[in-house]
């Protein structure tokens, strides 16, 4: 398995080096099988229930992080992945576990988009509700067992 992952990442790197040599269509699929692509990111739902930090570790092994959501479109995509899996909710990569009231994405992206209710919860890790039509994010104890969604960069370049 480790050898296969190394070969996969090597191929992704070679693919990135060759981008300048050939023009790629902007709709090229660049995610591994089973992942969903949106722009230059790949998303995957993981059904095995884990605590927040354990879920982040698995996403790291897969080459990414728990999903960071920076727009309404990305929020809809992640929510659809969870909804199609027929579960109620899943971890995304946001928490205020380091400092109460200061929310951080596990991949370091700025916290600029939110789908929380009007009053922000504190001392929590965040799940996305599969069926919510508005305010789909909720706080959950970080030690709760939940399925989760990972995000990683797509292994292609979208320059034409």
Image: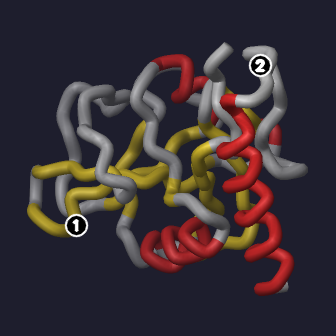
28 displayed left or right of 38: right
Which one is nearer the viewer's eye here, 34 or 133? 34
Q: Position of residue 158 (x, y in %)?
A: 65, 23
- Kindly identify the residue that appears in the image at 60 percent across and 24 percent down: 76
Q: Quadrant of residue 38?
A: top right
**Element type at marker 1?**
strand
The N terminus - image quarter? bottom right
Residue labelled with disc 2:
23
Whichever of labels 1 and 2 marks the residue nearer the N terminus, that label is 2
Could you tell me residue 137's position as x and y percent? 42, 38
Q: Tag 2: Cα neighbours inside 10 Å, few (<14), some, or many (≥20)? A: few
Labelled disc at residue 97: 1
| Figure check: 150 above or below 86 | below
Residue located 21% across and 49% down the image: 103
Q: Vertical placement of 131 versus 46: above or below? A: above
Task: Give percent across and percent down for residue 144.
Answer: 48, 73
């Amino acid at each position: 398995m480790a050898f296969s992952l190394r070969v996969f990442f090597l191929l992704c790197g070679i693919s990135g080096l060759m981008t300048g040599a050939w023009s790629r269509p902007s709709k090229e699929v660049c995610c591994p099988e089973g992942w969903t692509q949106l722009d230059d990111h790949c998303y995957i739902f993981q059904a095995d229930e884990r605590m927040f930090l354990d879920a982040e570790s698995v996403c790291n092994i897969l080459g990414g992080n728990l999903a960071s959501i920076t727009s309404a479109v990305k929020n809809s995509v992640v929510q659809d992945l969870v909804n199609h899996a027929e579960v109620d909710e899943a971890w995304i990569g946001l928490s205020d576990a380091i400092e109460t009231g200061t929310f951080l994405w596990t991949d370091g992206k700025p916290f600029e988009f939110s789908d929380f209710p009007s009053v922000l919860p504190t001392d929590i890790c965040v799940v996305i509700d599969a069926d919510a039509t508005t305010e789909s994010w909720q706080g959950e104890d970080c030690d709760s067992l939940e399925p989760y969604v990972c995000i990683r960069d797509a292994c292609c370049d979208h320059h034409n």
